[in-house]
């Protein structure tokens, strides 16, 4: 195959891609057999009045000698011959041992289960929450003012926390298994473009369908999934995992347990700590959600072309650093055309997140603005970060009126340290409702100080970002786990309990759907290798 990198096409050029490739390679169109999009991004930086470009990496199959094509393009460093191949897979044989158990059916647990099932290991999966359809109903009832269900909410249930976000698949990791995960998503009903978009996303609405299809495939391959089944004890003897207890009742024997509990399983963290499993405190972040008209973001990113239907809704990534303080403020989980959602998982606490459907067509952009938190802020004991999170979530619950309404404030009033009216640039999207207050009452001082420094800086990058009437909603707290379950880098097993595989965000080794899914895949292959050895 011939690979073309940095292939820039004006966004409004709707010529067939094969014709554009033929022109680039100086070939007649009939010599192009196939063009595969490897990556597609967007460059809206507009150097010296240049248009907005779609930027491609393409693999091209031609029906003439490839070396002759390259001979004509000797000076073009963006054209080369490549050999494409899939990620290596382990050719293993089934071992006569107890069936592996997986705790949690988020991305890490789901993909470790899928790999194990494909290789004949028939995993048993226990998920504390409900199946995704029941979960969706429970969440909608809560958002409409109903009762919070502690094991069926935005954090817990089939698909994990990422199912009720934006379904973002961006990741900073570089791992060959990414391709396998993306292909599994597409096979289960995700849009095919996730395989090549620079910033792929599935959307909450489609992701709910996808996770069900992956579940059914695991079942068809011999796996079993039990919902409303919370692990309540780990049976450990001589530093080896021997089984688990579910719902304080049934006990299941297993010599291998995959622990994909998610970053909000605070009671399970406490259980693990009490059992002496090696853990450590780790940094995380705290902040707010900020909302703007989507047009404001589109115009800032695309200029006069911002209304074009050929361009996707725009996103942004912002960072502000104060090196003297050792603090940063950064945007996180930016949801174009989305909404702010109630993401509580414990009674008497309020926490927010962001969500978008596939079309991202709500007309409102939202993002978390987060400030880094370290063990020096909350304490170096393993569970101190959880206590820190709970404290500020309780403060948000109190500020919101003790009814799961969220505290909100305009940027102008926040910067002036006052509370006034509800003259919002956009109506807050958080449900079941909001209450105007001073966000400084439910955030640490270092967080509010950093936000006050960062907002004017961000306004210079995106005009109107820190406008007087822009609304912020508190508090955002679940961007990552507050502690880490320590494991061996090669075996993926717990440092001090043989057969226990901590995986995903909850274990402190991932940060998003893709990295968690890949972590689950790698742990499953490590398990297979450990058996073979």
Image (cartoon, rainbow, N blue to C red):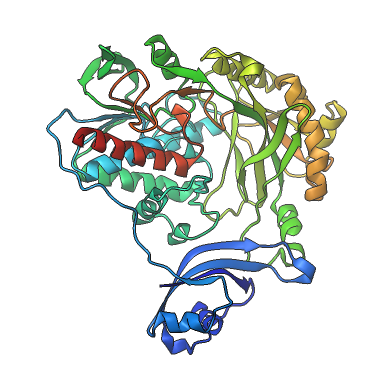
396 relative position to 148: left or right: right
- Nearer to the camera, 115 or 124: 115
Residue 276 point in image, percent of width and height: 39, 11
Question: From this viewpoint, which residue is outermost toward the left?
Answer: 96
> In this orientation, which residue lies closer to the viewer: 319 or 494?
494
Residues 50 and 433: in front is 50
Q: Residue at x 49, y 45 (%)?
A: 173
Q: Is residue 171 above or below residue 125?
A: below
Horizontal and vertical percent position of residue 292: 72, 46
Q: Is residue 475 visible?
A: no
- Residue 533: x and y in percent read 21, 34
Specify whether 252 is left or right of 134: left
Quadrant that contains the N terminus: bottom left
Q: Is residue 499 left or right of residue 75?
A: left
Q: Position of residue 85 (x, y in %)?
A: 34, 61
Kindly tell me whether residue 442 is visible in this rendering.
yes
Q: Viewed as shown, does residue 47 lie left or right of 358?
A: right
Determine whether 171 is above or below 432 in the image.
below
């Amino acid at each position: 195959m011939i690979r073309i990198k940095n292939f820039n096409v004006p966004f409004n050029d709707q010529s067939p891609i094969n014709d554009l490739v033929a022109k680039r390679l100086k070939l007649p169109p009939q010599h192009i057999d196939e063009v595969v999009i490897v990556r597609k991004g967007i460059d809206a930086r507009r150097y010296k009045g240049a248009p907005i470009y779609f930027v491609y990496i393409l693999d091209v199959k031609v029906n003439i000698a490839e070396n002759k094509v390259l001979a004509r393009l000797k000076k073009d460093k963006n054209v080369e011959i490549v050999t494409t191949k899939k990620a290596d897979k382990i050719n293993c044989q089934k071992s006569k041992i107890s069936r592996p158990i997986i705790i949690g059916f988020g991305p890490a647990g789901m993909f470790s289960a899928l790999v194990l099932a494909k290789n004949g290991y028939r995993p048993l999966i226990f998920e504390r929450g409900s199946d995704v359809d029941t979960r969706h109903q429970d969440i909608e009832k809560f958002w409409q003012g109903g009762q919070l269900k502690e094991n069926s909410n935005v954090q817990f249930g089939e698909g994990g926390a990422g199912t009720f976000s934006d379904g973002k698949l961006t990741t900073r990791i570089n791992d060959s298994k990414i391709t396998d995960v993306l292909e599994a998503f597409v096979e289960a009903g995700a849009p095919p473009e996730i395989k090549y978009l620079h910033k792929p996303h599935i959307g909450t609405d489609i992701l709910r369908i996808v996770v069900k299809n992956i579940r059914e495939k695991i079942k068809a391959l011999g796996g079993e999934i039990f919902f409303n089944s919370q692990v309540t004890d780990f049976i450990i003897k001589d530093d080896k995992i021997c089984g688990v207890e579910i719902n304080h009742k049934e006990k299941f024997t297993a010599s291998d347990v995959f622990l994909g509990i998610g970053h909000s399983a605070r009671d399970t963290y406490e259980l693990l700590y009490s059992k002496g499993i090696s853990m450590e405190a780790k940094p995380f972040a705290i902040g707010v959600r900020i909302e703007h008209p989507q047009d404001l973001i589109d115009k800032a990113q695309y200029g006069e072309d911002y209304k074009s239907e050929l361009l996707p809704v725009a996103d942004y990534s912002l960072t502000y650093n104060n090196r003297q303080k050792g603090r940063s403020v950064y945007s996180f989980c930016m949801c174009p055309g989305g909404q702010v959602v109630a993401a509580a998982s414990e009674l008497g606490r309020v926490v927010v997140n962001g969500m978008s459907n596939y079309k991202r067509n709500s007309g409102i952009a939202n993002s978390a603005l987060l400030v880094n938190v370290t063990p020096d802020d909350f304490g170096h004991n393993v569970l101190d970060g959880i206590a820190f999170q709970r404290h500020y979530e309780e403060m948000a619950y109190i500020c919101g009126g003790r009814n799961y309404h969220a505290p909100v404030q305009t940027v102008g009033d926040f910067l002036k340290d006052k509370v006034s009216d509800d003259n919002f640039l956009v109506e807050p999207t958080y449900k079941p409702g909001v209450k105007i207050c001073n966000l400084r009452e439910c955030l640490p001082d270092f967080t509010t100080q950093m936000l006050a420094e960062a907002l004017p800086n961000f306004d210079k990058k995106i005009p109107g970002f820190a406008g007087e009437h822009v609304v912020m909603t508190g508090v955002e707290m679940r961007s990552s786990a507050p502690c880490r379950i320590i494991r061996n880098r090669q075996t993926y097993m717990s440092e001090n309990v043989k057969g226990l595989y901590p995986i995903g965000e909850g274990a402190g080794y991932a940060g998003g759907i893709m990295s968690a899914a890949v972590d689950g895949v790698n742990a499953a292959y490590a398990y297979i290798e450990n058996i073979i050895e």
